[in-house]
Image (cartoon, rainbow, N blue to C red):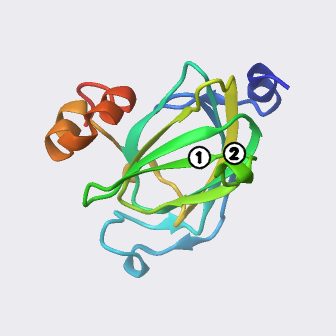
Amino acid sequence: MTAAYYVDKFSMQPHPEGGYFVETYRSAELIPKAALPGRFSGARSFGTAIYFLLESHHVSALHRIASDEIWHFYAGGTLDIFVITPTGELSVICLGNKPEQGEVYQAVVPAGCWFGSKPAPGTDFSLVGCTVAPGFDFTDFEMASQEDLFHEFPQHRQVIEKLAKPGYM
């Protein structure tokens, strides 16, 4: 299967951070704002899920959200997910189907971490899924600015140059 097959089959649309996505699930039930931590500005669905596809020329720009995000590998090749914690620790998750090479089928990016992704070298595309709880809401989405991240995490300049765009806030 090709990237174009999955984009067409699942009616995927361009994602603001890069690549393509389609929401596949949004809980009909809501968690009231009063029951959520203060970082949430309103009620949220119990959970949400998407398919997400990146081709070799795409990057998912560095961003952060207010919820934990669980990533799932489905098809294509390895996806490298770069995570910078609030304390500046950098880790790279290799999401894929080769556990003998250190790849994992699932991984969690904790709430409040900056993260972005790119298909690993030699990968034509990566089809993955993302499950968010409490559910994803674009008001919880913050795109990183290269300049701000250079200032906050100068030790990760190479990753920031690769995955953050100038001028975003």
Locate residue 51: give its quadrant: top right
- x then y, percent, for residue 76: 75, 33
* 136 sits left or right of 55 in the view: left
Q: Are marks 1 and 2 in contact (CB under 8 Å)?
A: yes
Spatial distance from mark 1 to mark 2, Cα to Cα?
6 Å
Question: Mark 2 = which residue?
Answer: 96
Q: Secondary structure at mark 1?
A: strand
The quadrant in which the N terminus is found is top right
Under mark 2, the amino acid is Gly
83 lies above or below 40: above
What residue is shown at x 66% (from left), y 26% (from top)?
Answer: 123
What residue is shown at x 64% (from left), y 52% (from top)?
Answer: 102
* 73 sits left or right of 165 in the view: right
Residue farthest toward the left in the current orientation of the protein: 151
Under mark 1, the amino acid is Cys
- x then y, percent, for residue 49: 65, 53
Question: Mark 1 = which residue?
Answer: 94
Residue farthest toward the front in the current orientation of the protein: 100
Q: Residues within 10 Å of mark 2 (few under 14, many from 20)?
A: many
Comparing 44 with 95, the one in front is 95
What residue is shown at x 31% (from left), y 27% (from top)?
Answer: 161
Q: Secondary structure at mark 2?
A: loop
* 108 sits left or right of 76 in the view: left
Locate residue 165: give its quadrant: top left
- x then y, percent, for residue 113: 37, 56
